[in-house]
Image (cartoon, rainbow, N blue to C red):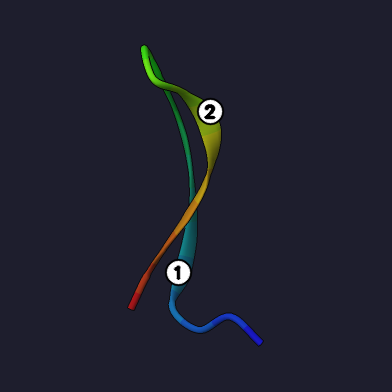
Amino acid sequence: MLQGTVKFFNDSKGFGFITEE
């Protein structure tokens, strides 16, 4: 299971989700 805070990003490279511990 993913740990940390899930953040949504959307920029010139595209979009998706990242996780920060």
Tell me residue 13's x, y (percent). 39, 20
Q: How many marks?
A: 2
Q: Determine whether the residue tagged by mark 2 lies in a helix, strand or loop.
A: strand
**Dot in front, 1 or 2:** 2
The N terminus - image quarter: bottom right
Q: Residue furthest top?
A: 12
Q: Is 6 left or right of 12, judged from the image as shown?
A: right
Q: Residues within 10 Å of mark 2 (few under 14, many from 20)?
A: few
- At x 45%, y 69%, the residue is 5
User: Eyeballing the image, is 10 above or below 1?
Assistant: above
Q: Determine whether the residue tagged by mark 1 lies in a helix, strand or loop.
A: strand
> Looking at numbered disc 1 in the image, what kind of residue is underneath it?
Thr
Location of residue 4 (image quadrant): bottom left
Q: Residues within 10 Å of mark 1 (few under 14, many from 20)?
A: few
User: Eyeballing the image, is 6 above or below 9?
Assistant: below
Q: Are marks 1 and 2 in contact (CB under 8 Å)?
A: no
User: Eyeballing the image, is 20 above or below 18?
Assistant: below
- At x 53%, y 28%, the residue is 15
Between 12 and 9, the residue placed more toward the observer is 12
Between 8 and 1, the residue placed more toward the observer is 1
Q: Which residue is mark 1?
A: 5
Q: Earlier in the sequence, mark 1 or mark 2?
A: 1
Tell me residue 20's x, y (percent). 35, 68
- At x 58%, y 80%, the residue is 2
Q: Residue furthest right?
A: 1
Tell me residue 17's x, y (percent). 54, 47
- Using the numbered discs, state the Cα–Cα distance from disc 1 to disc 2 in whole angstroms: 17 Å
> Looking at numbered disc 2 in the image, what kind of residue is underneath it?
Phe
Q: Which mark is residue 19?
A: none
The C terminus - image quarter: bottom left
Q: Which mark is residue 15?
A: 2
